[in-house]
Amino acid sequence: MISESLALLAAAAAAGARWNWWRPVVSGGLPTLMYHKIGDPPPGSTLAKLWVSAADFRRQISYLKEHGYTSITFADWRDAEKGLTTLPEKPVLITFDDGYMNNFELAYPILRESGMKGCVFLVCETMDGHNSWHDPALEPWLKMLTWAMVREMQDCGVIEFGSHTMRHRSLASIPLDEARWELTESKKRLEDKLGREMLGFAYPYGAGAYQPEVRAAALAAGYRFDFSIKQGISRLPWDREKEAVRRLLIRGDDTMVDFHLNMTRGRARL
Ligand SMILES: [Zn+2]
């Protein structure tokens, strides 16, 4: 009996160390999922955790539907802030950073079939090309979305786009005037190309989100919503003056328990 109790205690301690189940449930917030690449990582990739398999992605989208979440876009959120509409009872934002072609090939069909919407942050100068900012020693270069794919996803109302700068540089490590150019030029070019206002901006590497002058530049560029990589769920109504919108990093090695804890506690791991 004693050894059984000890084993149970050890199991509980292990779960406590790995998972965050003991945290209080967050309610009244806007869970904002952050994905990057959908599919299976190429052999030898050192960035496998940033890949979520299509099967896992499908399970996560099913979870959202089964638990009564309604996906919204930046425009839905803007309209609600303006009082033109109200947000659904359990809103969720499904975001993708960088704009990989696998988002079109694998995530878009799943979202479309499920009646869910997502938002993709594009790196303007990599469109129709590859992720040239990235070190191919860590993982081979990947194809990025083409303008034709972006238009198709926009036209059917499944995906809204936002900016992730021109070149995916860290805005915290370049002169402020160059950061301003990354912010304003990408907004202008994407708007010219897509004929829609770019309401959302995500900081590459999350860098600059907590640097007052960089964040001020992002808001001055005209973005209504800016997104960090700080783990958590921002409350609604969102306090724009306080900080950029927090997100939930969805990792390739996450289980559905992790996903559930992210959605309810704002964090799965310690
Ligand atoms: Zn990025």
Image (cartoon, rainbow, N blue to C red):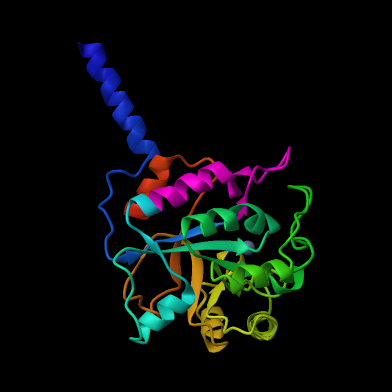
Q: Is residue 37 magenta?
A: yes
Q: Is residue 19 magenta?
A: no
Please state which of residues 240 and 177 is positioned toward the viewer in this rendering. Answer: 240
Residue 2 appears at what percent x and percent y? 21, 12
**In the image, is 173 to the left or to the right of 7?**
right
**In the image, is 250 to the left or to the right of 2?**
right
Residue appearing at x 32%, y 69% in the figure: 88
Position of residue 113 relative to residue 177, above or below, is: above
Please state which of residues 29 and 118 is positioned toward the viewer in this rendering. Answer: 118
Tell me the quarter of the picture where residue 168 sits. bottom right
Residue 269 seen in render: no
Residue appearing at x 55%, y 75% in the figure: 201
Residue 188 seen in render: yes
Position of residue 111 relative to residue 57, above or below, is: below
Please state which of residues 126 and 59 is positioned toward the viewer in this rendering. Answer: 59
Residue appearing at x 63%, y 46% in the figure: 39
Residue range in magenta is 36-64
Residue appearing at x 65%, y 59% in the figure: 104
**In the image, is 117 to the left or to the right of 123?**
left
Please state which of residues 132 and 215 is positioned toward the viewer in this rendering. Answer: 132
Position of residue 78 relative to residue 89, above or below, is: below
